[in-house]
Image (cartoon, rainbow, N blue to C red):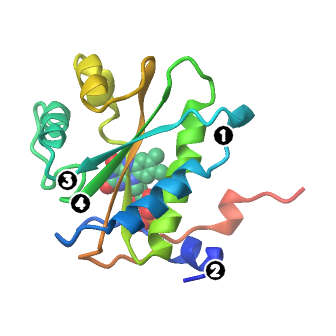
Amino acid sequence: MSNILDAIEKRSSTRGYMEKRPTKEEMECLLKAGLQAPTAANRQEIHITVVDGQNPILAEIEAERNKGMVPPHNFYYEAPVVMILSGDAGFHWSAVDAGIAVENICLAAEGLGLGSLIIGCIRDAMSGGKKEYFSRALKFPEGYEYQVAVAVGYKAVAKEPHTYDMDKNVSWI
Ligand SMILES: Cc1cc2nc3c(=O)[nH]c(=O)nc-3n(C[C@H](O)[C@H](O)[C@H](O)COP(=O)(O)O)c2cc1C
């Protein structure tokens, strides 16, 4: 897929993955896509932790998120890789910068024929009582905090992209 508009149109959230892992070259391509994203004042502060889907830290995050509930799937849908984006807690634009970077990663994944899923549902778990523990375990730089995560891997399920209402969401003046 060479056209960025094709990737934008075809990307959708993948909630089911094959065991097969993305190659090192594919992972490097995703990392470049994330790091190539624009950042406010060109701070380039977003840090990406690449976590193997088998790493026990993911089960610990899952357990923290699930306190009091048992969801049908784990938060990353058994993806072979989860990328966790952290940003400088003291920088006003880190959340926006991480959002832009994560979408770059999703579009690059689509371009490579991979699936992706943006993950926000672990926010409370990442910023609660185990915040310092998770931040250290995930090698966040000093003063950084969780922003967003993205699961990536080969798609085991198909899903149509979402539809939208141009009239509702757009005003021309
Ligand atoms: C900031 C953000 C957080 C999200 N968090 C989750 C999540 O925790 N779990 C999940 O299954 N999907 C999550 N999603 C995916 C959305 O549910 C999905 O993008 C939306 O339903 C539209 O579907 P599509 O991505 O297939 O077009 C998140 C998306 C965004 C942008």
Type of amino acid at the residue the image marks with label 3: Gly
Residue denoted by label 4: 79
Where 156 sits versus 121, above or below? below
Quadrant occupied by the C terminus: bottom right
Quadrant occupied by the N terminus: bottom right
Q: Let me know if residue 103 appears in the view.
A: no
Within-10-Å neighbours for mark 4: few <14, some 14–19, many 20+ = many
Residue denoted by label 3: 53
The numbered dot on residue 39 is: 1
The answer to the question of whether label 4 and label 2 lie on touching residues, with beta carbons closer than 8 A, is no
* Mark 2 → mark 1, Cα distance in angstroms: 23 Å
Q: Which circle's residue, 2 or 1, is located before the other in the chain?
A: 2
* Mark 3 → mark 4, Cα distance in angstroms: 6 Å
Residue denoted by label 2: 3
Image x and y of residue 11, in percent: 48, 71
The numbered dot on residue 172 is: none
